[in-house]
Amino acid sequence: MKALDALYEAQKIAFSPFVFQTAYSMHNLGIFDKIFEAKDGLTLQEIAQQTNLDEYGVRVLIEMAAAADIVEKNSATNKYTLSKIGYFVARDEMTRVNMLFTQDICYKGLYHLEDAVKNGKPEGLKEIGDWETIYQGLSKLPGRLKKSWFEFDHFYSDNSFDEALKVIFKDQPKMIFDIGGNTGKWAIASTRYNKDVHVTILDLPIQIETAQNNINQNFADIKDRVHYYPINVLDEQSTIPAGADVYWMSQFLDCFSEAQIESILLKIKENAKPGAKVYIMETFIDNQRFPAAEFSLVATSLYFTVMANGNSKMYSSSVFKYIIDKAGFKCVGEHHLHEDSYHTILELELK
């Protein structure tokens, strides 16, 4: 890379918040939609007219977007169209979910990243709530923030459920413990998939309350087969009970440090019956097919650092396998889900 090109790339980093806020504002103000819907593009004046915005505001946004290669100008017509980059910013679902999550959950908090790294605590969390970890406050988040958090969480899990269910039910389990059950989506999917299975959701009391209300109010046909076990798995005195054929953890263990992951697995091991299976579904950094997915996961680690709990991250599968072995389990299967998913399921048994 030539020095002038490197200097240009350095300025992109220096001004990256300006570019992000430009893209977010254009999304929110409907500018992307208007440009996308216009076959041959729009002039500045046409954008201003169609969005009921002042031409000055439109101009500064469009000029920044053009400098960032988000829009392109036709010099003959003075009309702007979306570039390939702009198309994905404007229309790609993964990009939309990531952008809204960044804006609503992480943006202000990232200002405190340096302190979070120094202190090992989610120092940015105070920007959205007064909790020790974000998980204690999920059900209390204001509407827009809650929507952005759960859209982000579900985007990276829901598209995997159909294939994951086939993996989990190959041995026809009768009792599944869903550890970190959140809003109950897996419990709902499992009991709908198999009419005989029972699912126990294990989670923080406030999350249990949310899941129970959701299922009781909206899924009466399955509520007799869904059970609840309030637990803080980080409490040294807490125990994970016996009785499960399958222990299921979907995007749960990445919420903890390596030592905490080991302690959770040891809690399972303590009461697990012979032949029980443990399934861990994660978006491992080293198992991604596309650079965009890997980049998103690496960035998400900083969310855990500054907003979630201060000590967890997105992991590689090799790290998980080391912890699994250390906790007294063996990995007997590794299921890479289909190309539209980002997930791998590790299938474990006791040694």
Image (cartoon, rainbow, N blue to C red):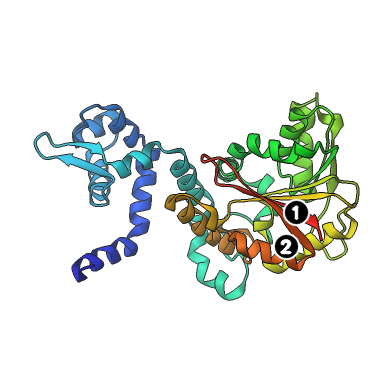
Q: Are marks 1 and 2 in contact (CB under 8 Å)?
A: yes
Asked whether the viewer can see residue 125, the reply is no
**Foreground: 295 or 184?**
295
**Foreground: 149 or 275?**
275
Residues at marks 1 and 2, CA–CA distance in whole angstroms? 8 Å
- Quarter of the view holding residue 223: top right
Q: Which residue is mark 1?
A: 348
Q: Position of residue 257 (x, y in %)?
A: 67, 65
Q: Amino acid at mark 2?
A: Ile
> Does residue 91 sit above or below 306 in this rendering?
above
Q: Which residue is mark 2?
A: 324
Q: Position of residue 214 (x, y in %)?
A: 74, 33
Which residue is at 58% across, 55% downward? 284
Count numbered badges in the picture. Answer: 2
- Quarter of the view holding residue 88: top left
**Which secondary structure lies at badge 1?**
strand
Q: For this view, does 108 lie left or right of residue 191? A: left
> Does residue 213 sit above or below 118 in this rendering?
above
Of pointers 1 and 2, the one earlier in the residue sequence: 2
**Foreground: 122 or 91?**
91
**Which secondary structure lies at badge 2?**
helix
Q: Position of residue 3 (x, y in %)?
A: 21, 71
Which residue is at 82% across, 53% downward? 231
Query: Which residue is outermost to the front?
Result: 332
Q: Quadrant of the C terminus?
A: bottom right
Query: Which residue is outermost to the top?
Result: 221
Which residue is at 42% across, 38% downward? 92
Q: Amino acid at mark 1?
A: Leu
> Does residue 327 sit above or below 102 in this rendering?
below
Q: Position of residue 177 (x, y in %)?
A: 81, 45
